[in-house]
Amino acid sequence: MQFWDNIINTALIGTDKKQLTVADLVNELTEGFEIINAETNIDKEEKFLQMASVAYNFRQSGANSIYKEGVTITEAPPEEKAYCNNCAITLLRDILEENSYSLLKLWLDECSKKNLITAPEMIPALLNIAISQKAMRSLIVQCCGNRAAWLSSFSADWKFSDKTTDEELWQTGTPEQRKLLLQQIRVNDSAGGRELLKQTWAEENANTKAELLKQLAVNISANDVEWIESLQSEKSQKVKDQALELLKQIPESTIVKQYTEILTQAVTIKKERSLMGFKSKISLHFHLPHIDENIFKSGIQKLSNTKEFTDEEYIFFQLIKSVPFSFWETHFSETPGNIIQYFQKDKDNKKFIPALVGSIVHFKDNRSAISLMEYSEVFYIDIIPLLPVQLQEHYSIKFFEHHEHSIIQYATLRENEWSVELAKIIFRYLAKNPYNYNRTFYNQYIHLIPATIAGELEKYTPPEDQFKTTWSNTSGYITKLLNLKLQIAKAFNK
């Protein structure tokens, strides 16, 4: 619409330099222009704004569609699922108005569980959200029914809703679509995802290979070792580097085995009698053997980057961090609790405990995480996500006072709702920091907040006058989101 471009250009240049004329508009706006222009009690800026307002409403009123010969549109196929009730659709509108993807995910989950679909008029808005919110695409497509796949033929941006097979999407999809597909397949069929990548591997360029290879980190296991190790013969250094990073995550890989072989020779356990001979003392002894140069090429640094470690100690630190905790159980034939105690009771060896923590986090070792939290003399915040939910709650509450920000950060990564006790502790802190934790924070994580906390919000009002009004407005917003959350379950049970 050229007339609208003329209005935009006038706004950008300014009415002092360019006046809107009747020639800049379409015939339908001529009468309105003459009436506004005839007004003598308003200045040129006001005239322009009034005319722009009229033109905007005219533009929004509709336009004739472009006609093209030979184009036929097939009718949308009938739906196989029932539609949601009106209450659920009204609630969906309210959620979209709040721009809360957290609540939208809850709504879509309920809709999917009930095997229902949304009303047709809501589909375009949901498909537009799915363009950026890739994690919700599958749910949105499920809840939009056959009409979503039909609409995808009218917009390339909505192609993800087209009912193409995984094989077709892998062959013809965009780079982002292919990465997402590979991730999704790896979740339930790691071997199938690997084989899919192998099918087209020779045809991919180096950058695409490296990006797709990263997706194998999902459910990576010993079954992936053989093929990933074969990629060390690739021409691209970027691909080889990415392959090596994946291999370092697999205890059965050659590189991790080489690390464990060094530590097997280097670290021994000795029992020594005390001076009086009544008690034996168990201690760990470290002596670095000759290390092949290839080990250093794999990423182990020769020189220390901190005063805390000598060069030799720093090599040990890196190696300990790069092998699974289970190595020590096998090497010493000891329980996890004893191993942790051996490291922490010697002041020189205690400095390697963070490396053990790094190893547990690196290999996502849930079992050893529990042992470390039980026997360690120091609380390590990075272990929290690896613990069962009950223990996450326990340690988060116990150590919240000294790790507020980190515990809140890890709590937001959870899928399950916080307990009321944890939520109360978190909210006491949030209310005192209303600028760091604003509406955006609550909008994003409302799915984790128990609805019962709504009745507690007033109790957390900060004593400082400058924070009271902010918290009052924020708590009102939180209450509104919690009410929407409560309505979701009710709406689908009517």
Image (tube, grey):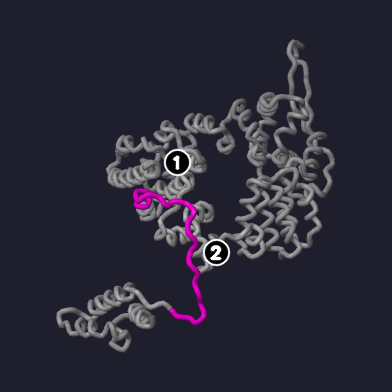
- Seen as rendered, the residue at the extreme left is 41
On the image, numbered disc 2 is attached to which residue? 159
Q: Residue 204, position in %: x, y?
A: 71, 64
Question: Is label 1 in contact with label 2 (beta carbons under 8 Å)?
Answer: no
Give 126 or 53, whichever is nearer the viewer.
Answer: 126
The range drawn in magenta is 66-91
SS state under label 2: helix
Residue 167 vs 307, above or below: the answer is: below
Q: Residue at x 76, y 51 (%)?
A: 228
On the image, numbered disc 1 is attached to which residue? 448
Q: Residue 141, position in %: x, y?
A: 51, 55
Q: Residue at x 65, y 36 (%)?
A: 365
Quadrant containing the N terminus is bottom left
Q: Residue 380, position in %: x, y?
A: 57, 34
Please state if 489 lies on the left or on the right of 306 as rendered: left
Residue 297 visible in the shown view: no
SS state under label 1: helix
